[in-house]
Amino acid sequence: MTPRPNSPAAWFLAARPKTLAAALAPVVVASALAWADGAFKAVPVVLCLVFAMLMQVAANFINDLFDFLKGTDRADRLGPERAVAQGWIATRGMKRGIAVVLALAAADGLALLYHIYIHTAGAHSTTVAYSLLALGAACVAGAFLYTTLLSYIALGDVLVLLFFGFVPVCGTYFAQCGTLTPAVWTCAAAMGLATDTLLVVNNYRDRDTDRLSGKRTLVSVLGESFGRWFYFALGTAATALALLAGRMGHGGASLAVFYMYFHLTTWGLLSRLRQGRQLNAVLGLTARNILIFGLLLAAGIALGL
């Protein structure tokens, strides 16, 4: 059903709610690590969750707008419909939506900094606050740079590794503990690699239209076979890192190995379909898999299995 222009339904679809799991799972993993290390703090976790969700929505709005302005959302687009390209939301309205969501994210971030400054004793609180402020600014810059530049020069995968792995996992843990451990870095890399499978499915499906639009992704440059095996390798590497984290004092992280069943099943479907709109089903399954990976990793760590 087509939503009415500028209706709540149109904004809901533009926010791409299915992608929120990829933003929230790293925060959950970081919180489980803090719990296992005896440093869990509820208020910073909630504020980090809200910030991650708002930044994901803002990034989706920015992507929707600038892909339309760049002409990437062509009539032969294979992916889900975009709000601006379909006329559900006007470009001016989307710009205002981006500003509102970013303002809410900034307010949430400032609330986190205030909480840390008030509740963390000594000069240590200032170091943590300034570090998180820098990370927040980097998140805003990354949201714009992804769509306007980096995704067009085959650097989108690097950005996903940073902003769905290292930044949310390390940032959330640091907000609670004021330090980082080797296990945190390892789990951050694992989440980033697992989440990148979602971008790879998008790029795999759109490889031909991306070439026509002049959008250079790793898959559009290196080809279909590379895309298939890259998807497989990302999930496999993420699982290997989870097992490595299990050898760093968080043995329960090894529970994430069960993710491989879902990853391999979805990879098999991607390998059979190869092209077309049918790959949107793989997109949905991949989003589910990322959530499964994050929940298994977090549960195993928190429960100390």
Image (spheres, grey):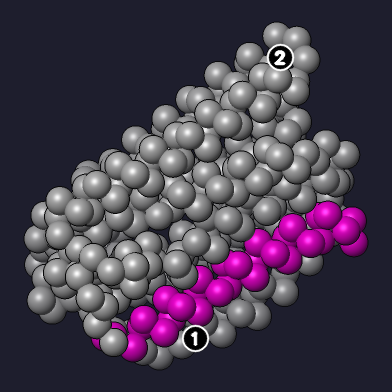
Residue 196 relative to residue 9: left or right: right
Which residue does the image show at 57% across and 80% down from the upper left?
A: 264
Residue 63 found in image quarter: bottom left
**Within 10 angstroms of label 1, few (less than 14), some, or many (20 or more) residues?**
some
Q: In this view, does 193 lie above or below 11?
A: above
Closer to viewer: mark 1 or mark 2 = 2
Magenta span of residues? 276-305
Q: Is the magenta stretch mostly helix, strand or loop?
A: helix
**How far across and how far down the image is residue 18, in percent?**
46, 70
Residue 292 covered by magenta stretch = yes
Task: Check if mark 1's residue and mark 2's residue have beta carbons within 8 Å.
Answer: no
**Residue 299 can be seen, yes or no:** yes
Which residue does the image show at 38% across and 71% down from the upper left?
A: 201
Amino acid under disc 2: His
**How far across and how far down the image is residue 125, in percent?**
69, 17
**Residue 209 can be seen, yes or no:** no
**Within 10 angstroms of label 2, few (less than 14), some, or many (20 or more) residues?**
few
Q: Is residue 205 above or below residue 17?
A: below
Residue 238 covered by magenta stretch = no
Which residue does the image show at 72% across and 27% down from the upper left?
A: 179
Residue 241 found in image quarter: bottom right
The residue indicated by pointer 1 is 268
Residue 26 relative to residue 10: left or right: right
Quarter of the image for the C terminus: give it: bottom right
Amino acid under disc 1: Gly
Which residue does the image show at 64% across and 39% down from the upper left?
A: 172
**How far across and how far down the image is residue 170, in percent?**
63, 38
Going from N to C along the chain, the mark reached first, 1 or 2, is 2
Quarter of the image for the N terminus: give it: bottom left
Give the SS element for disc 1. Answer: helix
**How far across and how far down the image is residue 26, in percent?**
61, 52
The residue indicated by pointer 2 is 124
